[in-house]
Amino acid sequence: MNIPKPILGLISSIETIFSTLIIAIAFYITIPIVVTHEIIQLPKGSVTNTIESLISKGYRLSAIDKYLLIAIGQPKSGELRIDKGVMNRLDFLDKLTTAKDPILVVTLIPGETRPIFLKEIAQKYKLDYNKLDGNYSKYSSYKEAGVIPETYHVPKGIREEKLIKFLVKFTEEQYRQISVEYFNTYNKKEWLRYLTIASIVQKESANKKEMPIVASVIYNRLEINMPLQMDGTLNYGEYSHKKVTPNRIKTDKSKFNTYAHKGLPPYPICSVSAEAIRASIKPDVTEYLYFMKNKKGVHDFSKTYEEHLKNISRAKRK
């Protein structure tokens, strides 16, 4: 069969284009992908949505990746855990379809209290608050501050007991490391005292820099048997975000009211950061007994009540 020369020429051109395309694709897939975040959030919907979302996050992808991904499989949606670093393009696209199950992000901020934290994650992830709280009491050695502030990544679908066990175990490991660093041991009875002081430091300090100074005020007052008289101790439990008013100070009969009771509260008032713990273990050496928040949002510290009154007057001026 004689094929007309124009047809032969067309076939040859197509073969050349196809070969060039294959070479171009082969080269393209060798261009690596830099994975900058361990957790990648992917939207629900089409492959196009997935590629566009990744491009918006700074990943160097193109329409070619769309067709490569279609050939590989259906990408997952939600939060996926993918190892950071430089990765082969095809491996990266494959990870989008085979990565570990979507995860939940559980964040506890420094200074938040147990009931508020547990209620938030119960509501957000449709978990049972009573089960979360019950398991907290079962596994944690501390009524409060049993979970260290952190952003945790846990498998989607995790149940209440397993979640609390994970959070408490991680926290205990962190506490043990810090305690051994300073004391070569981890004595939970002594650690409770440091956590309690750290929780007041956490509530009262305007920033990390102030923490060792605030801790020094606490120790100075305890040493002379002076009431702590700190509003932050009344922000315990459900009162975490409640403004402390003169009436509240008069009517709160709990041991957390350091205006009415000398010494420390019975246990920590909130979650505590590593910085607050370190400040409670190694406070600054000062003679300060008072502090007052100034107009800049930080505290003025003073040794005498007369100085303190001047700082109060200065803070109230318009």
Image (tube, rainbow, N blue to C red):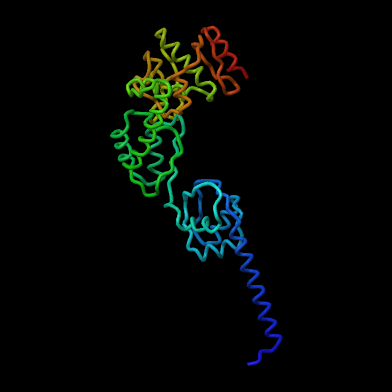
Quarter of the image with the C terminus is top right
Which residue is at the far bottom? 1
Q: Position of residue 288 (x, y in %)?
A: 51, 11
Q: Image check: 102 left or right of 35?
A: left
Figure disc tally = 0
Instruction: State the residue in front, 231 or 122.
Output: 122
Q: Position of residue 145 (x, y in %)?
A: 38, 29
Q: Residue 12, located in which quarter of the rendered image?
A: bottom right
Above-or-below relation of 182 to 42 = above
Q: Residue at x 37, y 14 (%)?
A: 263
Instruction: State the residue in front, 224 or 91.
Output: 91
Above-or-below relation of 20 to 205 = below
Q: Position of residue 136 (x, y in %)?
A: 32, 35
Q: Residue 172, located in which quarter of the rendered image?
A: top left
Quarter of the image with the N terminus is bottom right
Q: Residue at x 37, y 42 (%)?
A: 122
Above-or-below relation of 2 to 186 = below
